[in-house]
């Protein structure tokens, strides 16, 4: 994946991942949605998402950066930062 993707495109791809791989209702996926409270992620889901993001970007999110991710928008921003 190249860095020519907009945050909107990244957001759309992440929504696809959450809906298809994690079976999350698309209506729940909003920028402010908390992964753990609103989307009912657990620690295993978080690891699975990190792996999916690595496959999507070809780059690894550093564990310390992933610990700071709380919302859907945080994920979009982290992926956008990886692709800079």
Image (cartoon, rainbow, N blue to C red):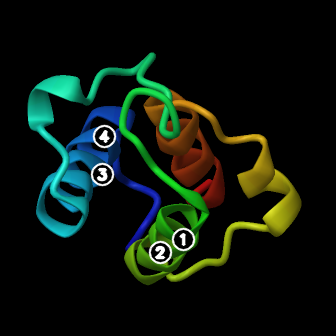
Image x and y of residue 56, in percent: 38, 74
Image x and y of residue 58, in percent: 51, 82
* Relative to 72, residue 44 above or below: below
Kindly report which numbered mark, 2 or 3, lies closer to the viewer in this rendering: 2
Label 2: which secondary element: helix
Q: Nearer the viewer, residue 5 or 43?
A: 43
Q: Would residue 47 appear left or right of 22 to someone viewing this image?
A: right
Q: Which residue is mark 3?
A: 14
Image x and y of residue 15, in percent: 22, 46
Kindly report which numbered mark, 1 or 4, lies closer to the viewer in this rendering: 1
Whether the residues at callouts 1 and 4 have beta carbons within 8 Å, the answer is: no
* Relative to 77, residue 55 above or below: below
Q: Of marks 2 and 4, which one's residue comes earlier in the chain?
A: 4
Label 3: which secondary element: helix
Q: Which residue is mark 2?
A: 48
Q: Of marks 1 and 3, which one's residue comes earlier in the chain?
A: 3
- Which residue occupies 53% across, 30% down? 71
Whether the residues at callouts 3 and 4 have beta carbons within 8 Å, the answer is: yes
- Which residue occupies 30% across, 21% down? 30
Separation of residues labelled 2 and 3 (CA atoms): 13 Å
Within the image, what quadrant is residue 66 found in? bottom right
For the N terminus, the quadrant is bottom left
Circle 4 residues within 10 Å: few <14, some 14–19, many ≥20: many
Kindly report which numbered mark, 1 or 2, lies closer to the viewer in this rendering: 1
Q: Which residue is mark 4?
A: 11
Label 1: which secondary element: helix
Whether the residues at callouts 1 and 2 have beta carbons within 8 Å, the answer is: yes
């Amino acid at each position: 994946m190249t860095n020519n993707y907009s945050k909107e495109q990244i957001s759309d791809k992440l929504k696809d991942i959450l809906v298809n791989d994690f079976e999350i209702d698309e209506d729940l996926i909003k920028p402010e949605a908390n992964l753990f409270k609103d989307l009912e992620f657990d620690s295993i889901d978080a690891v699975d998402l990190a792996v999916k993001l690595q496959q999507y970007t070809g780059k690894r999110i550093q564990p310390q950066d992933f610990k700071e991710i709380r919302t859907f928008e945080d994920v979009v921003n982290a992926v956008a930062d990886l692709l800079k």
